[in-house]
Image: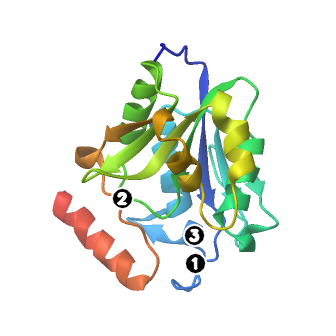
Amino acid sequence: MTDHHITDITGILLAAGAGRRLGTPKALVEFDGERLVDRGVRLLTEGGCHPVVVVLGAATTPVCGAVTVLNPDWETGMASSLRVGLTAMPESASAVVIALVDQPLIRPAAIERLTAAYRKGAAIAVATYGGKPRNPVLVAREYVAELSESLTGDAGARPFLRAHPELVTEVPCDDVGDPADIDEAADLTAIREAAHKRE
């Protein structure tokens, strides 16, 4: 591995889904008095990403502190949203961090660990919890085009990462967040309870 010189690292927040099982778009759900989309932007911003690109779809809403882009094909799944977000990356960006709107217990320190791994030469850095890869994920600029071309359906970056294990650096983040995601109302209740126990 070679050291990477960091210019700007773009953050992409995927927030286009309708949240069908939840009954409302996840981006608009409030968690501790803050919309999940705003919490996700804060996660990436405080973690050192600039700019932050929010991909919207089912719900369109103003988002402070971020560039918002619309995925007209959001119903086809996560791949189309990620592709739209990657297309919005500034040319100056040296890497991108991808995060999901429905994981509110991940903290900015996880983003900082990924960028630290990138600084040390990692081409792709993936946060792990309990030894299992989850989100967020950092991808160096030189692999963004290949990632974008590989995207299909609702899989996101995972198939690309599995196809290139030699590029992946796993970054343990157990102590700086919980990857639990919100798919339905019961998940939201459980995550709120878990957050309060951590306080």
**Mark in the foreground, 3 or 2:** 2
Label 3 secondary element: helix
Report if residue 11 is visible in the image.
yes
Residue ID at (82%, 66%): 72
Do labels 3 and 1 touch, CB within 8 Å?
no
- Inspect the image, locate mark 1, and give the three-letter code of the amino acid beneath it: Gly
Q: Which mark is residue 50?
A: none
Residue ID at (70%, 61%): 152
Q: Is 28 placed left or right of 92 in the picture?
A: left
- Inspect the image, locate mark 2, and give the three-letter code of the amino acid beneath it: Pro
Provide the residue designation for mark 1: 19
Q: Is residue 74 above or below residue 64?
A: below
Q: Residues within 10 Å of mark 3 (few under 14, many from 20)?
A: some
Query: First in sequence: mark 2 or mark 1?
Result: 1
Q: Nearer the viewer, residue 75 or 169?
A: 169
- Inspect the image, locate mark 3, and give the three-letter code of the amino acid beneath it: Leu
Label 2 secondary element: loop
Residue 83 is situated, as x and y percent measured from the top left of the image, at 73, 51
Query: First in sequence: mark 3 or mark 2?
Result: 3
Residue 168 is situated, as x and y percent measured from the top left of the image, at 46, 37
Do labels 2 and 1 touch, CB within 8 Å?
no
Label 1 secondary element: loop
* Furthest residue in direction right, as rendered: 72
Do labels 3 and 2 touch, CB within 8 Å?
no
Provide the residue designation for mark 2: 179
Q: Which mark is residue 28?
A: 3
Residue 171 is situated, as x and y percent measured from the top left of the image, at 34, 38
- Which part of the image, by quadrant, shows the C terminus? bottom left
The image quadrant of residue 156 is bottom right
Residue ID at (55%, 34%): 49
Query: First in sequence: mark 3 or mark 1?
Result: 1
